[in-house]
Amino acid sequence: MNEDGMRDHEGSCITLSDGVPLLVFEDVSVAYASRSIFENCSLVDRSSREVSDVRTGGIIGVLRNSDGSSRTLMNLLMREEISTTGKVGISPTLFACRVNAEHGAFVQSASLRSNFILNAESRVRDLAEYSEENSLFLNQIRSYDSRKVWDICKFVGLSSVVTGSVHESNWSEVSLDSILALLDQNDLIKIRLVRALLALPEVLVLDEVGDDMSVQDLQEMHKVLVAYLEYKIPGVDDTETCKLLRKVANVPRTIIWSGFKRTLQPYVDAKNFMLVVKDSSKIIFTSPDGAW
């Protein structure tokens, strides 16, 4: 890692200009035993000019492909996979949460509440001890009582399998593994989405979210995503903690959303951007019309 926390195999430093770049992806190589995924790969625009600065704000779509390279890209951005060369990752000054349906992301023996606040507890450990941000965030976590978490779950659209049809004070104390067999993929995604929202991330990483949803479910999900971008998640964004973290970060929220064309196209409009793995040496950073 270099002094800014980015993985940098070349030993050079990443210079942060005014404002905070969202991510870096330069000269990255990743190979598995059977094949090479990326070879000195960088972000370029449609004219093959290198893109060195991707700014925060709005939605950045990642076009899902069949060879798995788009998933490797997401792993690299979240630093859950290691490249052999280059500089790669979401800026370490931004707190990012990943949302997908993988079972390994859950503590199955723990309660629902423990699973919901997992990312928030991780974030508070990242904040300087005794700082105002740390103190306020601890208070934020303590405020996540049964009713508040239930309301957020209903806002996100979790099914009654998780929440019950009406609020009961002990609903979140049941163990996740007691209901896991009853949950579909959409419920797993929404549990992770609630968990992410409770941590007030600057970056929300949606990994193949929506590809298996109905049109109606996807439309409802998009309303939640818009509320996230606009700091309008009830019970979370209307707090002193959010106000302070927003002031300290001083950047707009960003969603990095990987999915198929049919999933992304209705929601990634001309104000936003796309990342498309062209080949092992190029990832195109383009407006949506250049991705489809």
Image (spheres, rainbow, N blue to C red):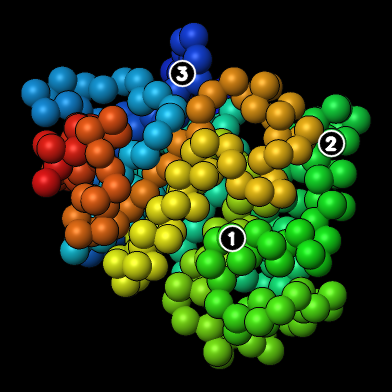
The residue positioned 24% from the left and 51% from the top of the image is 266
Q: Is residue 106 left or right of residue 260?
A: right
Q: Is residue 119 left or right of residue 14?
A: right
**Where in the figure is residue 49, as x and y percent of width and height?**
15, 20
- Work out whether 237 lies above or below 287: below
Mark 2 vs mark 1: in front: 1
The residue positioned 42% from the left and 61% from the top of the image is 220
- Element type at marker 3? loop
Question: N-terminal of the two: label 2 or label 1?
Answer: 2
Q: Are marks 2 and 1 in contact (CB under 8 Å)?
A: no
**Image quadrant containing the N terminus:** top right
- Element type at marker 2? helix
**Where in the figure is residue 109, as x and y percent of width and height?**
73, 80
- Work out whether 285 lies above or below 178: above
Mark 3 lies on residue: 14
Query: Does residue 30 appear in the picture of this structure?
Result: no
- Work out whether 43 lies above or below 179: above
Mark 2 lies on residue: 136
Task: Report the amino acid beneath label 2.
Answer: Leu
Pointer 3 local density, CA inside 10 Å: few below 14, some 14–19, many at least 20:
some
Pointer 2 local density, CA inside 10 Å: few below 14, some 14–19, many at least 20:
some
**Where in the figure is residue 292, as x and y percent of width and height?**
11, 46
In the image shown, does 6 or 208 lie closer to the viewer? 208
Which of the 4 image quarters holds residue 5?
A: top right
The residue positioned 46% from the left and 36% from the top of the image is 254
**Where in the figure is residue 48, as x and y percent of width and height?**
11, 25
* Cα distance between the residues tagged 2 and 3: 31 Å
- The disc placed on residue 155 is 1
- Element type at marker 1? helix
